[in-house]
Image (cartoon, helix red, strand yellow):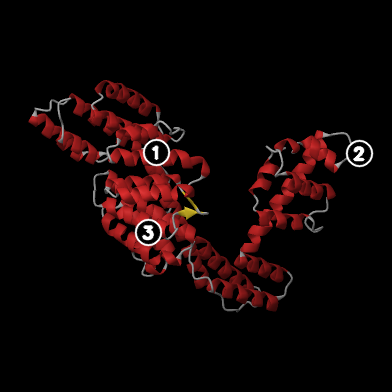
Amino acid sequence: MNNSPLFHLFLAFSKEEKVACRKFLHSPYHNQREDVRQLYDYLQEQYTKSSVALTKERAFAHLFPTDDFADKKMRYTMSFLLKCMEAFLIHREREAEKVANQLLLTRAYRRLNLPKAQAKVLKNAKKILDAQPLLDIEQYENHYQLASAHYDAQAGQTRNAPLNLQEWSQALDLAFLAKKLKLSCFALAHQAVYRVEYDTGLLSAVLDFLENFSDLEKHPAIALYYYFYQAQTTAQHEFYFKKLKTGVVEQSDLLPLEEKRNLYLAAINYCIQRFNKGEEQFLREVFDLYQAGIEQQILFEKGKLSRFTYKNVVGIALRLQEFQWAEDFILNYQDALEKQFKENYTHYNLSKLRFYQKNYTEAMQRLQQVEYDDLFLNLDAKVMLLKIYYELGELDVLESFITSFQRFLQRKKLIGYHQENYGNMIRLTRKMLELNPFDKQEKRKLKQEIESIKALSERDWLLKQLTDRKKF
């Protein structure tokens, strides 16, 4: 029973939700089955105890003390309870949608032919919507639904009633623009990693419309996704990135937290991609964005920091030689990681810090404490080991390691542009090993190749090793 969907849902409830759900189940309007109420109460009593107690047999004996165990009957009761708990979740979500609730009420009053009550509710819905300063996709959708409800109310009164067709049409446009751009940006980011192609549908028409849309700046939820998309896809990428960065910093307060986080991450990912292509100036840009996002808690979700954000922030700080800041960040924010990632990512990032500080012994010791279930953590750890072996002059170990690293990379097909980046790192490291350190022409040729390759995140390290190249 403790592995059932019912129990997993129950465990996911907060303390307050557990209490509220019990009240919901004890209301005869929502549930009339006594065995369902009793099973929920039994879960509340038993869930903190040993999982051995939470078996279907024990629960059945509690619910039906005079009956022999019947698995089918128990499963039915569990199924009924699960449906009731899901109904409770729907009820809770609906309660939070104040504007949507008012619109449902207007529909009911229209069905009951009570136009005055309908008009009053519509007025209240508009008041609620106008009091919400944030403009995200949900709000655009609410404006559209409200305009639609106003039209229905007016059209149902008299044939000559003034209609709000222009307002309705504009609300539809804004809702569609916001949804289409956000989805297109997500698709763009996804295909950059996984090398897939999407049919963009009406996107080209949307972009053409927005290019001459005079009110674009008034709608940050539309404008900022538009700037991101243009920064990623047009020759004027720097112009649009500056507008994106300015908007994220100055206008993101007009958006809800989740939308702000999406846009911060979009700007950050753009900077990382540009830097990986050799545009060094974006390193400080992304560091500034990360610092602001962390200080303002924008990059946190439910008080937790993504392990990817944690790793990326440290990596960028180290490239900028911000060693003390990086160590403080690693130690101060390790508890903000999800419990299952804390140990691995703390060890990995401390090992990377020690590598930059040339404490190779501790770096390797900490890497040995990392479990490599995460593909990208595994890849980055391999890059670090490659660099350690090279800098220590462990040539036999390095040759064997490069071969195994290359085979590993060939088996991984779904890592997009990362495949090219890691492949370049392996190939160029091997070229450095084969290079005659006294052949200036070959050295200059290799330097030019390293500088010209776009997908190469370890460019600085490779150039430094080439400059300091010694005969092993």
Few, some or many C-alpha atoms within 10 Å of disc 1 (few <14, some 14-19, many ≥20)?
A: many
Task: From the viewer's side, name the closer residue of 11 and 149.
Answer: 11
Precedes in sequence: disc 3 or disc 1 = 3
Q: How far apart are marks 2 and 3 (CA)?
A: 64 Å
Looking at the image, do the residues carrying marks 2 and 3 touch, with CB atoms under 8 Å apart? no
Examine the rendered structure and indicate whether residue 163 appears above or below residue 18: below
Task: Please say whether residue 439 is visible from this viewpoint.
Answer: yes
Callout 1, which amino acid?
Tyr
In the image, residue 122 above or below residue 300: below
> Percent x, y for residue 245?
33, 60
Q: Which residue is located at x 33 percent, y 42 percent? A: 353
Query: Within the image, what quadrant is residue 443 found in?
Result: top left
Does residue 183 appear to the left or right of 147 in the view shown?
A: left
Secondary element under disc 3, as helix, strand or loop, is helix
Identify the residue position indicated by label 3 in the image: 292
Q: Which residue corresponds to mark 1?
A: 348
For the residues bearing labels 2 and 1, Cβ distance under 8 angstroms = no
Residue 432, relative to residue 151: is it above or below?
above
Name the element at disc 2: loop
Q: How crowded is mark 3: few (under 14 residues within 10 Å), some or many (20 or more)?
A: some
Label 2 crowd (10 A; few <14 / some 14-19 / many >=20): few
Query: Of label 2 and label 3, which has the lower sequence position?
Result: 2
Report the residue marked by disc 2. 66
Give above or below for 258 relative to 75.
below
Under mark 3, the amino acid is Ala
The amino acid on which the numbered mark 2 sits, given as a three-letter code, is Thr
Residue 195 seen by the camera: no
Give the distance between the C-alpha atoms of the residues marked 3 and 1, in whole angstroms. 24 Å
Tell me the residue at 65%/51% (across/down): 13
